[in-house]
Image: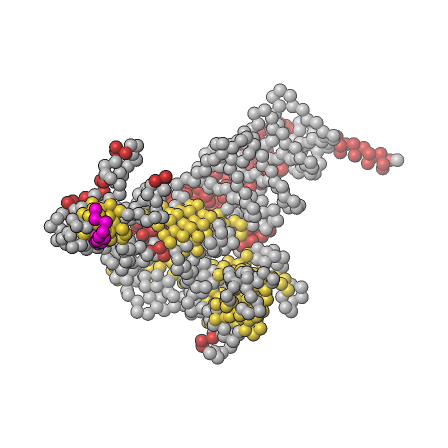
Amino acid sequence: MNEDRFVIWRGQIVDDATWKDNLPATKWKSSDEIPGWGSRYRVRVVGKDTEGKDVPDSQLEMATIMYPVTAGSGHGGSYQTSNLRKGSFVWGFYEDPDLKQGLVILGCLGNNEQIMLSRTTSISGFDPFSGYIRENVPYNDIPAEGSPIPPNGPRPLEGSNNQLQTSIADQEQLKKGQQEIPLAVPSSCDKLQLGAIQIEIQKFLQDIQDFKNQVNSWKNTILRPINENGKSYSIEEYITYKIQNVAEFISGQLKNLITEIQGYVTRKINGAAKETYDLLPPDLRASAKPAVETANDLLACLFRKIIKNLLGLVVKFLMQIAERFINAPLCAVENIVGSLLGKLTGLINSGVQAIMAPLNAILGTVDIAGDIIGFVEDIISFLSCQDQPECPEVTGWSIWNGPTRFTSSSNSNPLSIVNKVKTYASTVQQSVDPENFDFDLDFSDIFEDTCNVGPIFCGPPTVEFYGGGGSGAAGNVIVNAVGDILAVDLTSFGSGYTSAPVVRFVDACGTGRGATGRSIIGPVAGIGTTIGVVQVIIDNNGSGYLQTPNGDRGGDGRVWAYADQTTVKRADGKYDRPYYPGEIINVNPGDEVYSCGRNSVITQGQAYTAPQCSQQILPKQDKYLTSLELDDVTIENPGVNYNCSIDKIKITPDRGAILEYECDSYGSITKVKVVKRGIGFTEEPMIEIETETGYNARFRPVFRVNSIGEVIDPNQVISVIDCVGKV
Amino acid sequence: MADTKNYHTIGYGTKDGEIKFGHIHEDGVLSGFIARNGHDPNHYITLEASGEPHRKHGTICRSPGSFQVQAGDNVPPNQAGIFFDSVSGDIILRASKGRIRIEAQDIDIIATGGTGTKGNITVEANDTVLINGKQSVDIRSKISTKLASEKTVEVIGNGILNIYGGLIESMDGSTDALSAKGSKLCPLPTPATPREIQQRIISFLKTVT
């Protein structure tokens, strides 16, 4: 080794097929089992080795590596491992510069994400190639964006600067992280638990749609094996598997109600028997008791049979909605539960009548069939007083979004469900044989309901207020041109609030993300002592929210069909997966085709080509103009060590606003005063204190929303879509 | 605020997994630290730095496989081997497609609510609640205890059945536990309960005296 000379070289680590056996790849117990001498890599050196591979990779010199001082050398247990891979471009020095031998790697060049890496090593020396050849690509290195059509689809970037790259791992985490989980509550708090059923049905529908859509979605194709525990399914098998899962949940919920009905019917029969017993002639009394016992046993048997068959009934029911529903709004869940409950009630009526027939011969006619529907009505009506103080408030949760559903958030209409129960109960004409109890129900008539279960247009977010003991607060969300939520224009203050209700921004298609806010309650001006929501403070503006519809359609928190996609609703009510422009679709009379904002009903069977839309026809929206005025500044962090007599508070852009602040003896900010409001904010201004000493103070602006009749300066207004009360 | 920004995200990874400081999630939440498995995107641990109240400074451990904690080998008896404390907020344990199994030498479930609507324990099953004390089952309350079923209640003392009461009333054929009606199904109907008979006699005596 010549210590007087330091000669550097640069080169590329070649295919690991020629050197990786130098490294132990399995667990080892003795150093005798290690095939080589530490982490070494075969390197093709520029100027020493040829580009044309006259010297094959397998005959190139092995290079050892120099670790940084922070890595340690292994002595005393201090170590870091090398993280070099085939294809890496490395720099180093020769231990013997005279003979150009003894390669020592000093470092590597980070790969630039713009460089297209070859997926083969049978190219010229020094050409860039991938380190993933013959290797598993981690999900966190598969970019989320890219052409859906292989082979030009997304390639792993293998960049050394990809720490903020959006990968499909990120997107999958988002999707699963935001997924709602229903939380059970005691039945005394919520007899029907419609919210929980809605969550499960929404998940079920979306899973099936994702699965069907995998033909056109490389992401689903990549993710599917792990999503379903590594099992492979056909579409039919997958639907069955998913239906089984959700059916178990729904039948569990319905079982609660069935047992309530069972209790009621048992009580009624026994009550009727008691009422009539002492009116019986003495010779019939002896036979009355065993008859009542038999009726009780048969009744128990009937309900056991119903509960046993419940899962099968719900499965059958879900099979019919699986491809007909894109979304599951609350009205659809009411319809599902109402129809299931109605048909079951009809069946129970029939069964009870059969059971009561011999008893009637002894006791006289005891008609309780009609009462059963009345009882079901009582149970369902209980929904309206479900907000009991001892009940859990949160009924839905997601690990990313936290509480997503509240007992007080159920806007279900008990009367609507009651009417459905009555309607569907009357459709069950089946007579039940008490010796057999075999039954089947027809659900083909439930799709006549008017509730929209199809896709809806993606648009601006809505705001919802939960809890706080009151109701009625509502408002429109102010979204600026770049998709940030700036404020809420309250259209109704509500009343009866005893604590600040939770604020949630709901984006039907999940395009926006991250916005959070909180409500302030107080006396509503001009309405006596009414306490309502008087202000909403935005804690996080989020990003990506739509100001107006963009043509995408979906609902339940996801985009189902992009604006340029064509969708087909078949004559039987089933939806195909959305089609990309250029795809050929076989359509038949009665099918509805939606493309480029137009809906048409097919009258003649044909092969239809999904068009490329040059212009979208978007639904008309009620809009009005607003102007934002700086109303207040909240202190997120008071910071410390500010020199209040010197440091200045600054707002950028100021739009005419002037601020002052106060601080305590530690230089922490205690108050920010809006001296002049400023008007016409269209983005969140930066509020900061220019200081040489202080640190960590953070502020947030709170805007007042002014509705204006006409445009004064188009750069100072934000157009708002009036979403209140609209679906 | 718009999109969350971090110019100083640091990462370290291989094909099998990665760790990052200052990761930005897809919903814009900043993570102080994330460790995730390259083989499954839903296998990760994050220490969150921003987001909604539950998320900010919270920890998410997400694993498609099981999440296992075993600890306490060296802990003396009567000390905590595992300690979970939700300082503010609920503890939710959920196994929607499975069973929650709690096993210990002794198990205490104590509700400590301080106000009138708190301090309750609700046990509800949509099928059967089974309580099986191999030695004894002791149910007590300060105000009232009820056992009720729409169909059948059986009280069985195979050796001895003792029923004690300061004032015992029993009746059959009752349609409502709170209303006192005489027996109707009994082969020899009694007009009323002993207490009712007593009250009627008193009432009758009052009318004649």
Q: Magenta stretch containing residue A16, yes or no?
A: yes
Residue A391 position within the rendered picture, expressed as x and y whole percent measured from the top left: 58, 47
Q: Is residue A492 above or below residue B67?
A: below
Q: Is residue A48 left or right of residue A315?
A: left
Q: Is residue A53 left or right of residue A261?
A: left
Give the total of numbered labels. 0
Q: Magenta stretch containing residue B208, yes or no?
A: no
Quadrant in the picture for residue A171:
bottom left
Name the residue located 67 percent from the left edge and 24 percent from the top edge.
Answer: B162
Residue B52 position within the rendered picture, expressed as x and y whole percent measured from the top left: 50, 55
Color scheme of the displayed model = secondary structure
For residue B116, say whether it is visible.
Answer: yes
Q: Nearer the viewer, residue A606 or A103?
A: A103
Residue A552 position within the rendered picture, expressed as x and y whole percent measured from the top left: 37, 62
Task: Determine the residue located farthest toward the right in the rendered image.
Answer: B209
Q: Which residues are magenta?
A: A1-17
Task: Determine the residue located farthest toward the top in the rendered image.
Answer: B159
Task: Determine the residue located farthest toward the bottom in the rendered image.
Answer: A712
Name the residue located 52 percent from the left edge and 63 percent from the top edge.
Answer: A694
Q: Nearer the viewer, residue A25 or A274?
A: A25
Name the residue located 46 percent from the left edge and 78 percent from the top edge.
Answer: A713
Q: Nearer the viewer, residue A367 or B77?
A: B77
Task: Determine the residue located farthest toward the left in the rendered image.
Answer: A54
Q: Is residue A641 left or right of residue A1?
A: right
Q: Is residue A466 left or right of residue A527?
A: left
For residue A327, say whether it is visible.
Answer: no
Name the residue located 49 percent from the left edge and 51 percent from the top edge.
Answer: B57
